[in-house]
Amino acid sequence: MEYRTLANGVSMPILGFGTYLLQNETCTEMVKYAIEQGYEAIDTAQAYENEEAVGEGIRQSGKKRDDIFITSKIRNRFHGYDNTLMAVENTLTTMGLEQMDLFLIHWPGENMYVPTWKALVRMYDEGLIRAIGVSNFLPEHMEQAAQATGRMPMVNQFETHPYLHQYEIIDYCKNNDVFPIAWSPLMVGGEVLDDPVILNIAERYGKTTAQTILRWHLQNGFGVIPKSSHADRILQNKDIFDFKLTQIEMEEMNQLTKKQIRVGDDPATYRFLLLDQLKEKK
Ligand SMILES: NC(=O)c1ccc[n+]([C@@H]2O[C@H](COP(=O)([O-])OP(=O)(O)OC[C@H]3O[C@@H](n4cnc5c(N)ncnc54)[C@H](OP(=O)(O)O)[C@@H]3O)[C@@H](O)[C@H]2O)c1
C-alpha cells in the first residue's frame, strides 16, 4: 500500500474501498472481504445509510482499529453547527468507534457550509476526528471555509475520471496542500471502461481498463475509492501498484477529458433541503 501524508501529518492510504449502494449483509461481507484482501481504507457516508454495516464489516475483518482508515461524510440535511456536532456523534455510535479518521462535508450547497466546517474544526480540535475535509467543493467554497476558520480542508473528494478531469479544482488543491480523492473513479463502471485509447494502453501492460484508469488517477496525484460488489473486481482494483504509465500515455488519457461527461450532480447548482425544511414539508 502507498500513503499520502495529509497537511496535518496524518498518513492516509491512497487506495480505499467505496461503499455507495452497498447495504446490510452484502455491505458487511464486502467490507470484510476488502480488508482481508489488503484494503486499508473504507469510504462511507451518512447518506449511504450503511455506516452500521460498514462498522460491522470492519470488526468482522479482525484487523486492529488503528490499521484501518475510516472516512464518513456529513449528510446534506445535517448542515449547520449544532446538527453537525450531533451527526458526527451519531456516526461514531452507529459505527461503534471512538474516533473517526476523516470526516468530510458531503456537498457544499449554498450558504450553510461555513458553520458546518466550524463544527468539524471543533471536533478535530477536540480529538474526535483525526483529519477533516470536504467533498464536491469548488475552489471558492474551500477558500471561504478556510477564511472563516483559518483551517484549510485537508482533503477534497470530487468526481474525477478520464472523461471529467477538473483542472481548476486540481490546481487549487495542489497549491493549498489539499489531497484530491476521485469519487466514481471508474465512472460507475460506465462507457469509459470500453474507451479504445485506454483499452490500447491497458493491453500493453496486461491490465484491465479499470486498473489502467485507477493507475492514471494515482499518477495524477489522486487517491481512489473504487466500489465493487464482486470479489474478483475487488481484487483486481487493488492490483495497481506494479506498473507505471508513461508520460505520453498519461497525456493521452488526460486528453479524454474533452468529453466532459459528468455522472453525478454539479456542485455549482446542486441544492438540497436542510433538516428543519424537511420537517416543515412533512
Ligand atoms: N463524495 C461524493 O459525493 C461521492 C459520490 C459518489 C461516490 N462516492 C464514493 O466513491 C465510491 C466510488 O464511486 P462509485 O461507487 O460511484 O463508482 P465507481 O467506483 O467508479 O464504479 C463502481 C461501479 O463499477 C463497477 N466496477 C467496479 N470495479 C470494476 C472493474 N474492475 N471492472 C468493471 N466494473 C467494475 C461496479 O460494479 P459491481 O459492484 O457490480 O462490481 C460498480 O457498478 C463510492 O462507492 C463512494 O464511496 C462519493
Image (tube, rainbow, N blue to C red):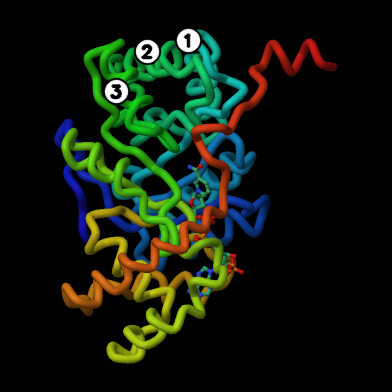
CA neighbours of label 1 inside 10 A, class few (<14), some (14 to 19), many (20+): some
Direction front: furthest residue: 258
Residue at horizontal 33%, vertical 75%? Answer: 239
Question: Which quarter of the rendered picture does the C terminus lie within?
Answer: top right
What kind of residue is marked 1?
Tyr
Residue at horizontal 24%, vertical 70%? Answer: 251
Between 111 and 274, the residue placed more toward the observer is 111
Q: Is residue 1 visible?
A: no
Element carrying mark 2? helix
Please name the residue that numbered disc 1 is placed on. 81
What kind of residue is marked 3?
Glu
Please name the residue that numbered disc 3 is placed on. 143
Element carrying mark 1? helix
What kind of residue is marked 2?
Lys
Q: CA distance from mark 2 to mark 1?
A: 7 Å
Residue at horizontal 64%, vertical 18%? Answer: 274
Nearer to us: label 3 or label 2: 3
The correct choice, above or below, for 204 with respect to 13 in the image is below
- Asked if marks 2 and 1 touch (Cβ < 8 Å), the reply is yes
Residue at horizontal 30%, vertical 48%? Answer: 167
Nearer to us: label 3 or label 1: 3
The correct choice, above or below, for 270 with respect to 214 in the image is above
CA neighbours of label 2 inside 10 A, class few (<14), some (14 to 19), many (20+): many
Numbered badge on residue 118: 2
